[in-house]
Amino acid sequence: LNDFSKDFYPYAKHIIQLHQEALSSLNELKNQNKRQITIVYTPVLGQYGLVDTISDFTKKYPEHNLSTIESYQPLSLLSQRKSDFAFVSENDAQDESFNKLIYKTDHLAVVLPDSHPLAGQRSVTIEQLYNEQFILHSSPNPIMHEETQKFMDLCDSKGFTPNIVAESQFTATMVRYVGAGRGIAVLNRLHIPTEVPNISIVDLYPTIHSYIYLLYPRKFSHSSAMDFLHFVIGQLST
C-alpha cells in the first residue's frame, strides 16, 4: 500500500463495518414487520365476534404481533397502509380498491317493551307498527346510519312516515329507552344487548339483511397478514 492507501484503509474498513451493521438492522426490522398485523374496525362493530376472532388468532399464532384500532375512519387507515385489515359496515364497503369478504350477516329486528302486545311474536310487519313511537340509531357523521337508512327506506316504500321520538348513537341507550317505555327501537339483531331487562326482540318481516365486511389490500406486504386472512376464512367455513 502506498501512503494514500494506508491513510484511507481505516476509513474504508469503518465504511464496510457500518454497511454491514445497517443491513443487519434493516433485516431485523423487516423480520419484525413481517410479524406485525394491524386491524382497524368501527366502534359499533365490536360486538360482532371480533374480540373472539382476534383472541383466537393470537392464541394460534403467538409469534405474530397483532394490534387493533377503533376508528370512525377505517378506510383512511387502510388506504394509508396504517392498517392491514378493516372490519366495516356496508357504507364503507363500497370502495372497490380493496378485496372484501362477508364476515357476518345480520338483519333488522324490533325491540319492544316486554309488556307490548306484539312482544313474544316471531316477527312483525311494518304495517303492525304504524302507531308506534320510534327510537332510531343516529350517526356521528352526515351519512345516515345504515340501520336507520334501511328502516326509512322501508317506511318510504310503504308510504309511511314514522313518529321518531328519540335518536342515539349508542345501542345500549336506545334499548334502555325501550325498557323504560319511551318507544320501540329498530336495530340489527346482533347489535341488541340481550342482558337489558324489560324488553322483547322480534324480527322484522320481510327480512332486511345487513352485512359486515372484512376489507384488505389487493396485495399483502408480508406473510403474517396472509395467516390472518386464512384464519378468518377458516372460521367462516366452519
Image: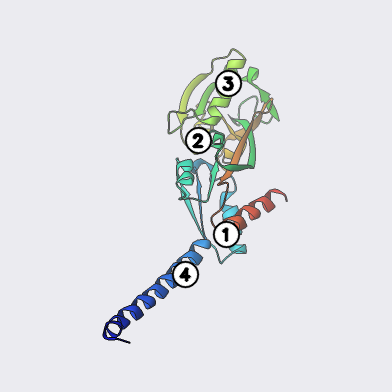
What residue is at 36 percent from the left and 74 percent from the top? 18
Q: Nearer the viewer, residue 67 or 125?
A: 67
Q: Where is residue 10 in the image (x, y as percent from the top left)?
A: 31, 82
Q: Position of residue 79 (x, y in %)?
A: 47, 44
Q: Which of marks 2 and 1 is nearer the N terminus?
A: 2
Q: Earlier in the sequence, mark 1 or mark 4?
A: 4
Dot 4 falls on a residue whose secondary structure is: helix
Neighbours of disc 4 within 10 Å: few (<14), some (14-19), many (20+): few
Mark 4: which amino acid?
Answer: Glu
Q: How far apart are marks 2 and 1 (CA)?
A: 42 Å
Label number found at residue 28: 4
Q: Which of marks 1 and 3 is nearer the N terminus?
A: 3
Q: Quickly name the residue at label 1.
A: 224
Res 205 visible: yes
Q: Which residue lies furthest to the front in this view?
A: 2
Q: Which of marks 4 and 2 is nearer the N terminus?
A: 4
Mark 1 in CB contact with mark 4 (< 8 angstroms): no
Q: How far apart are marks 1 and 3 (CA)?
A: 41 Å
Q: Quickly name the residue at label 2.
A: 176
Q: Earlier in the sequence, mark 2 or mark 3?
A: 3
Mark 3 in CB contact with mark 4 (< 8 angstroms): no
Dot 2 falls on a residue whose secondary structure is: helix
The image shows residue 54, relative to residue 199, as above or below, that is below
Nearest to the eye among marks 1 and 3: give it. 1
Nearest to the eye among marks 2 and 1: give it. 1
What residue is at 44 percent from the left and 70 percent from the top? 23
Q: Where is residue 115 in the image (x, y as percent from the top left)?
A: 60, 29
Q: Which of marks 3 and 4 is nearer the N terminus?
A: 4
Q: Nearer the viewer, residue 211 or 118?
A: 211
Q: Distance between the residues labelled 4 and 2?
A: 52 Å
Dot 3 falls on a residue whose secondary structure is: helix
